[in-house]
Amino acid sequence: MNINKKMLELGSKRSIIREIFEFGKIRASEIGKENVYDFSLGNPSVKPPKKVDETIVSLVNNCNSTALHGYTSATGDLEVRKAITNNINKRFNVGINENLIYMTCGAAASLSITLRAILNEDEEVIVFAPFFTEYRVFIESAFGKVVVSNPLEKDFQIDLADFESKITPKTKAIILNSPNNPSGVVYNEQTIKGVCQILNKKSKEFGTEIVLISDEPYRELVYGDINVPYLMNYYNNCIVCYSFSKSLSLPGERIGYIAISPKLTEVKNVYNAICGAGRALGYVCAPSMFQKVIKECLDCSVDIESYKKNRDLLYNSLVKLGFNCIKPDGAFYLFVKSPSNDAFDMYEKAKQFNILIVPCDDFGIKGYCRISYCVAYDMIERSIPAFEKLAKVYKLN
């Protein structure tokens, strides 16, 4: 049968993260789960806030079945969208309304729908390395082209000169992810202002409208007093793709939204295009029950201190052993430079000690590995002797 070869390729080969995760399950069955240190998947280990569980129980016990499990409007339940806009305006004062919110099945759906809505064939989308590997899939599936902007490797902030050099008359959008997966870096306000100044300058120069897509599943996962700029306050042509997967520890429930800046050019047409893209991609509506759950839990967040405790143990231990690590200000990933400058070499050597980490060449940066520390604290403790053995292989101590 003459099937779509691109879809066959995507379906036949899982992402490297999923490949490692599946290997971990096999290895655990062979030597015991307690002897495998699986840092591959960004699957939250911290429980959802208590209010989430309480809300689910209350809805199940008190709601009419059709109201709880039936269809909502394709754009999402009206009262849910109103609650989200009230929350956004209370926190960031951007003047958004419920008619600029589109409920989705998480950030992946938000990005896929947004890109399909705004891209025409062969238009370019700039991504900032290191970037989440699936961006390439989302962009190319929307008939766009990926353009990679390289970071300042000293701190992994955006290299503004490199970014500006990558903008062309075909540039339609950029995707900015902060806190960043895989580095854990939060782009500071100076960086954000620089990006937006360049976008305004280049849009004027080329007579185009470049859209800034803010991918925000980790917004609430920051440590200390770190500020995560809300990009609608810095750039008019902004679309926010949000997910509750990490902030409420609900990755499997697939609930999120698209929020469009009221200042975006032709905002009504863009919103209608998003509705059309959702329809074309088969997103009938976001999960009804979890729309209602998040409506009651918008001011909640998971216990950040648990992730901070994990970060501090892992980061301090690896630095002490001689590894070169980027200290994350947000998310739950540690970005570690391979001592041999070869990410796959570090991945393979770590695997010898049953440490499962992700080589990040597919994230747009060569020579680094990602360690996901959204795991049990005691697993990190148990893994330290294995990391010591890895350090000795590289003669770091």
Image (tube, grey):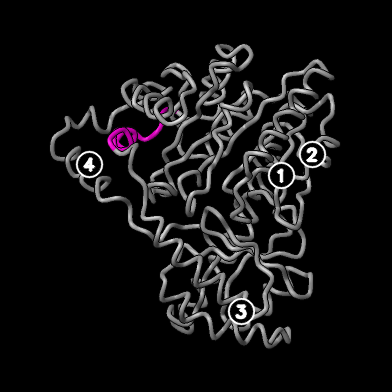
**Relative horizontal placement of residue 131, taking residue 245 as reference (left or right):** right
Residue placed furthest toward the left: 62
Q: What number is the disc on residue 163?
A: 2
C-alpha separation, residue under disc 2 versus residue under disc 4:
44 Å
**CA distance separating discs 2 and 1:** 8 Å
Q: Are marks 3 and 2 in contact (CB under 8 Å)?
A: no
Q: Amino acid at mark 4?
A: Thr
Q: Residue 224 in the image: x percent, y percent?
A: 47, 53
Of the two numbered discs 2 and 1 on the same chain, state the one appearing first in sequence.
Answer: 1
Which of marks 2 and 3 precedes in the sequence?
A: 2
SS assignment for the magenta stretch, majority: helix
Residue tagged 3: 320
The magenta region covers: 284-296
Q: Residue at x 39, y 25 (%)?
A: 76
Sort mark 3 into few (<14), some (14-19) or many (20+) by Cα contacts within 10 Å: few
Mark nearer the viewer, 1 or 3: 3
Image quadrant containing the N terminus: top right
Which quadrant of the figure has residue 159?
top right
Q: Which dot, 3 or 2, sits closer to the camera?
A: 3
CA–CA distance in space, label 1 to label 4: 38 Å
Q: Earlier in the sequence, mark 1 or mark 3?
A: 1
Query: Which one is nearer the viewer's eye here, 21 or 388?
Result: 388
Side of 315 where 73 appears, left or right: left
Separation of residues labelled 1 and 3 (CA atoms): 30 Å
Mark 1: which amino acid? Phe
Marks 3 and 2 sit apart, C-alpha to C-alpha, by 34 Å
Secondary structure under the numbered disc 1 in the rendered image: strand
Which badge, 2 or 4, is on the more N-terminal residue?
Answer: 4
Callout 3, which amino acid? Lys
Q: Earlier in the sequence, mark 3 or mark 4?
A: 4
**Do the residues under discs 2 and 1 have CB atoms within 8 angstroms?**
yes
**Secondary structure under the numbered disc 3 in the rendered image:** helix
